[in-house]
Image (tube, grey):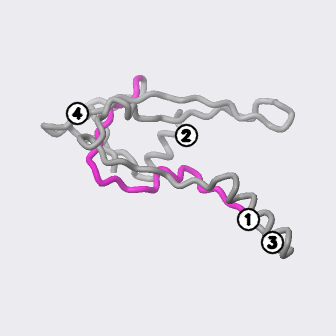
């Protein structure tokens, strides 16, 4: 959990502020995942802090968004072309990629329980 908060801080995702009048803060929760190796042994535990966006109303609190993801058929076509033309293929992963997008709307989120900083009570998503 500390790694997740540290990553958010390094990427300047959230900033502690006072809640502005006319806005409401969404609550948050921790989502946990266990990463395993090829033999099924636990490599590490991951924690991700997520906003409970289902409490917001579309068109009022936010505009519709999406994150493009390739489809299985697209990947199969690329792999077939790579094999046919004997090309070299590289892949990459962008760690915490969702933290790199800026928001158009103002989003305020409650601090997670157990990780509150006194004096300020709301996080503002940059």
Q: Which residue is mark 2?
A: 3
Q: Which residue is mark 3?
A: 88
Q: Percent x, y for residue 64?
A: 36, 48
Q: Percent x, y for residue 69?
A: 58, 53
Marks 2/4: CA–CA distance: 27 Å
Crowdedness near tag 1: few (<14), some (14–19) or many (≥20) residues, C-alpha within 10 Å = few
Mark closer to the chain start, 3 or 4: 4
Mark closer to the chain start, 2 or 1: 2
Mark closer to the chain start, 3 or 2: 2
Residue at 32% in and 35% down: 109
Q: Which residue is mark 4?
A: 24
Question: Cβ–Cβ below 8 Å for labels 3 and 4?
Answer: no
Q: Which residues are magenta?
A: 90-113
Mark identifier at residue 78: 1
Marks 3/4: CA–CA distance: 50 Å
Residue at 58% in and 29% down: 32
Mark closer to the chain start, 2 or 4: 2
Residue at 64% in and 53% down: 71
Crowdedness near tag 4: few (<14), some (14–19) or many (≥20) residues, C-alpha within 10 Å = some
Marks 3/2: CA–CA distance: 34 Å
Q: Which of pointers 2 and 4 indicates the residue nearer the eye? A: 4
Q: Percent x, y for residue 56?
A: 31, 34
């Amino acid at each position: 959990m500390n790694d997740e908060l540290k990553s958010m801080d390094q990427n300047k995702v959230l900033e502690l502020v006072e809640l502005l009048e006319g806005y409401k803060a969404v609550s948050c929760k921790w989502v946990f995942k266990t990463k395993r190796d090829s033999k099924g042994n636990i490599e590490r535990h991951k924690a991700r802090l997520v906003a409970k966006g289902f409490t917001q109303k579309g068109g009022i609190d936010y505009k519709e968004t999406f994150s493009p993801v390739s489809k299985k058929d697209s990947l199969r076509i690329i792999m077939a072309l790579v094999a046919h033309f004997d090309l070299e293929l590289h892949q990459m992963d962008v760690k915490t990629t969702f933290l790199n997008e800026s928001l158009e709307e103002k989003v305020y989120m409650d601090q997670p329980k157990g990780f509150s900083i006194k004096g300020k009570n709301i996080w503002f998503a940059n």
